Amino acid sequence: MRVLHLLLLALGLLLSQLGPGACHLTILGQRTDSYICARKGGTCNLSPCPLYNRIEGTCYKGKAKCCIR
């Protein structure tokens, strides 16, 4: 029984060390623009969008473009 408690404690400590960037949620529960781009099937590019792709939004707080085929 003590082994189970120690394993649960270790798991809890491990999960508590994850930083705020570990998930795609912001503080208020809104999705980031890069998450929305990935959900639409796009990619975030700092350079211009590849040929035959269109700009569908922004990523990384407006620093990059969301390119969708």
Image (tube, rainbow, N blue to C red):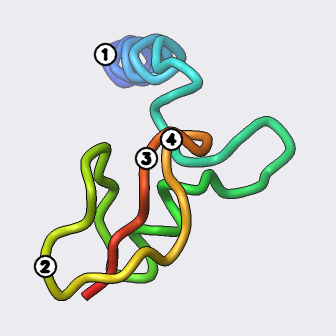
Badge 4 element: loop
The answer to whether 6 appears left or right of 28 in the picture is left
Question: Which quadrant would the N terminus be assigned to in this image?
Answer: top left
Of callouts 2 and 4, the N-terminal one: 2
Q: Is residue 15 left or right of residue 61?
A: left
**Mark found first going from the N terminus, 1 or 4:** 1
Mark 3 and mark 4 in contact? Answer it, CB < 8 Å: yes
* Left or right of 64 in this view: 32: right
- The tag on residue 60 is 4
Q: Quadrant of residue 38?
A: bottom left
Do callouts 3 and 1 mark residues in contact (Cβ within 8 Å)? no
Q: Earlier in the sequence, mark 3 or mark 2?
A: 2
Query: Where is mark 1, residue-wise?
Result: 3
Earlier sequence position, callout 3 versus callout 1: 1
Mark 1 crowdedness (10 Å alpha carbons): few <14, some 14-19, many ≥20: few
Tell me the mark number nearer the camera, choosing from 3 and 4. Answer: 3
Task: Measure the C-alpha gap from mark 3 to mark 4.
Answer: 6 Å
Circle 2 packing at 10 Å, graded few (<14), some (14-19), many (20+), is few
Q: Is residue 58 above or below residue 22?
A: below
The mark closer to the camera, 3 or 2, is 2
Residue name at image x 31 percent, y 16 percent: 3
Label 1: state its secondary structure. Answer: helix
| 19 lies above or below 63 | above
- Under mark 4, the amino acid is Tyr
Mark 2 belongs to which amino acid? Answer: Leu
Q: Residues within 10 Å of mark 4 (few under 14, many from 20)?
A: some
* Rendered image: mark on residue 64: 3
- Helix, strand or loop at label 3? It is strand
Distance CA(mark 2)–CA(mark 4): 22 Å
N-terminal-most mark, 2 or 1: 1
- The Cα atoms of the two marked residues, 2 and 1, are separated by 57 Å
> Dot 3: within a 10 Å radius of its alpha carbon, few (fewer than 14), some, or many (20 or more) residues?
some
